Amino acid sequence: MRLDLKRLFLLAGLLCVAGGALWHMTRAPAPLDRSARLAHYDTPLPAPAAGLGIYYLGHSLIGPDIPAFVTQLAQAAGDAGAFYNSQLGWGASLRTHWEPEEPIPGFDAMNHPPAHRPAKDALDSGSYNALVLTEMIDLQDAIRWHDSGRYTALWTQLAKKHAPEIRVYKYETWHQHLNAANWLDRIEHDAEALWEGTILAQAKAYPGVGTIHVIPAGRAMAAFARELQARGGLPGMPDTDALFTLTESGARDDIHPSDKAAYLIALVHYATLYHADPRGLPHHLQRADGTAAEAPAPEVAALMQQVAWDVVRRTPSTGVPQMAGES
């Protein structure tokens, strides 16, 4: 059989084109530049309707108690239909939650009914108004080794496929509190450079993702810590170490929030998700297991409420109108 060189060259060319197209479809798009990324926040979101259903996906810096606190705050403010579900792990990345062959550390300990609902099943249902995602710490490792931008996009695409109007939020956390000054400086650096400038710049470049808003809990923790230092401490909270829980040995944990800090974080979630001033809301709340949380002193709670509202209203990526209402 005579070899037809012309057809052979044509076939080779088609294979090259097809391979190039496949590579183009699977490779990550170029991250959004700063101006394109910030343009997503030019127009604030409208305040949500009552009956807000929230799905939380992440790890122990969400934990079982912060969603429970947010729901109690919402119900106290009048949203009787507020509800939530979650899927959590110990230090779990968004990639770990997505990939079925990757075990989720601490899954059995962190996920109990009625709060737990398997993540993909939950989002397939289209039952939620908001999706709150966070990422493992250390954040630089998450970006480098766990492809955080891509997996943020995958979870967002899945949520919007089944609930096109769902609001997606990246819950900005913090790093280990090994040194108070370095801790504050890194929070402020990482908010722009890593959370928004890297992860969200990558994620929002994928098709079908659109805008992802931010819950600036890390920045609120830093703002409260600075105010705490300026006042020389407050009742029951003498310094920033008191923001973190105690271990069973009595040593201070260097990353997991105490009940009092979890209250501050829940205020930031509430203010962002509901576009609502948290000042005057209750500060005596229950943990997810029904036991009473350790409440901040009234003076501490009032400062936390003010800080949460101020930080949310001066962070455009929250989607909340900036400095709206009385200051």
Image (tube, grey):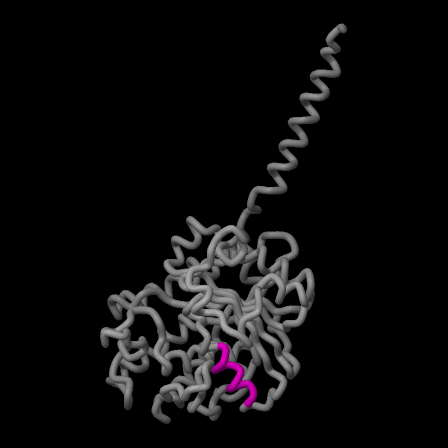
Asked which quadrant contains residue 80, the reply is: bottom right
Judged left or right of residue 124, residue 116 is left
Residue in view at x 57 percent, y 69 percent = 117
Judged left or right of residue 117, residue 190 is left
Most extreme residue toward the top is 2
Residue 26 painted magenta: no
Q: Find residue 282 and report its horizontal and vertical position in percent.
A: 46, 92
- The majority secondary structure of the magenta stretch comes to helix
Q: Find residue 187 and report its horizontal and vertical position in percent.
A: 36, 66
Asked which quadrant contains residue 125, the reply is: bottom right
On screen, residue 44 above or below 300: above
Asked which quadrant contains residue 172, the reply is: bottom left
Q: Nearer the viewer, residue 298 or 105?
A: 105
Residue in view at x 69 percent, y 63 percent = 162
Residue in view at x 64 percent, y 83 percent = 50
Q: Nearer the viewer, residue 182 or 93?
A: 93
On screen, residue 122 above or below 321: above
In which quadrant of the rendered image does the N terminus lie?
Answer: top right
Q: Find residue 139 and report its horizontal and vertical position in percent.
A: 40, 58
Q: Find residue 267 and report its horizontal and vertical position in percent.
A: 46, 81
Part of the protein shown in magenta: 67-75
On screen, residue 146 above or below 269: above
Residue in view at x 54 percent, y 91 percent = 76
Q: Nearer the viewer, residue 14 or 41?
A: 14
Q: How many marks?
A: 0
Q: Nearer the viewer, residue 137 or 221?
A: 137
